Image (tube, rainbow, N blue to C red):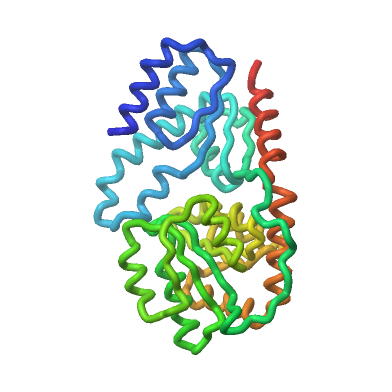
Amino acid sequence: IHNRKLAAHFTKIAKTLPKPNCAVIAYPNPELCKAAAAYCIKNSVPYIVDFRDPWPDSFAGYLPKVLWPALCPLASYYRWIIRFAANNASGITSISETMLKWALSYKTKSLNAPHKAFPIGYKSPLKTEEPIVQDVTETAPITAVFVGLFGSTHGGEKIIEAFNILWEKGEKRAKCLMVGDGNFAALWREKAKGNPNIEFLGWADKQKLREIMSRCHVGLIVLNDAIRKFWFGNKLFEYLASGLAVVAYASPEVSFLLEENSAGTAIHNGTSEELAGAIERYIENPVLLTLHRKNALDLFKREFVSDAIYTKFAEFIEGIVP
């Protein structure tokens, strides 16, 4: 309902505003995307669709199979919107190559329209000093951090199970900080009960999060199977900018990025045992951990600083404007 009201409001106020030279339309919100595309087509305004999330193809992963038939009408409508917006767009962009390919799969007309992936960029590294090798002990453990919504998008239970595995084996040189909140908070806290090496910190503002990450060595990304094949995970870039080795169960694109640059560990099967094993390898080999942390920071500086990314994005937009 909110999405439809927002789209109706846009349609109303757009009539009172000067015609732009170009428009950048984010998807989702599907209804607003449809309204904006319709406005651009009617007024001969070139537009770019920037795909940020794979609605509706990710929906099924959040619902029991018995409810999937009920999803079909909404999914069909949203897919029609994607085709309508993409087929008439002057350009298509996305947050990753994987998401871009997904968006282009809905484009039934010519693929001649320019298309390019632009990842999220940050102003500068959040960490300035080089990571150093340290001895890993019970008093100086490896500290991993998960930051995100405690909900069905993220596999927080697997993270907790992994650190429970380590604790039950007598491994006290690994600590996990869970930063965030959400519908699954009570469930995750219950599963972590009895493990003093798992700490819940609640939501943190930008400054507090920066302070938390400065105490950590590893950043954790574990995504729901319905979303992971499309998505980077929106904290990847903050982990890299903080000089954290990234342990991720995410898209193949993320796995390739980490492995190609030795900036972390890709989890391929998504099990708690595999995640626990990745942390154990860092405990036993702090030199490897330090290398991955240094490479993560170097990767960020090389590929994900905002000035370079958004300069290229601006050039892409300028290329669309006649």
The answer to which of 7 and 101 lies nearer the viewer is 7
Q: Is residue 38 depicted above or below 177 in this figure? A: above
Q: Residue at x 36, y 16 (%)?
A: 12
Q: Is residue 278 visible?
A: no
Q: Residue furthest bottom?
A: 170
Left or right: 127, with 14 as reference point: right
Asked whether, in this view, residue 290 is left or right of residue 216, the answer is: right
- Measured as percent of width and height from the top left, residue 79 is found at 40, 37
Residues 69 and 114: in front is 114
On screen, residue 264 versus residue 80, left or right, reads: right
Is residue 17 at least partly visible in the picture?
yes
On screen, residue 309 above or below 25: below
Q: Is residue 93 above or below residue 137?
A: above
Quadrant for residue 236, please give it: bottom right
Depth check: 137 or 252 in front? 137
Residue at 55% over, 38% down: 104
Q: Which residue corresponds to the image point at 46% horizontal and 53% vertical from the top-left?
A: 227
Count of number-bearing discs: 0
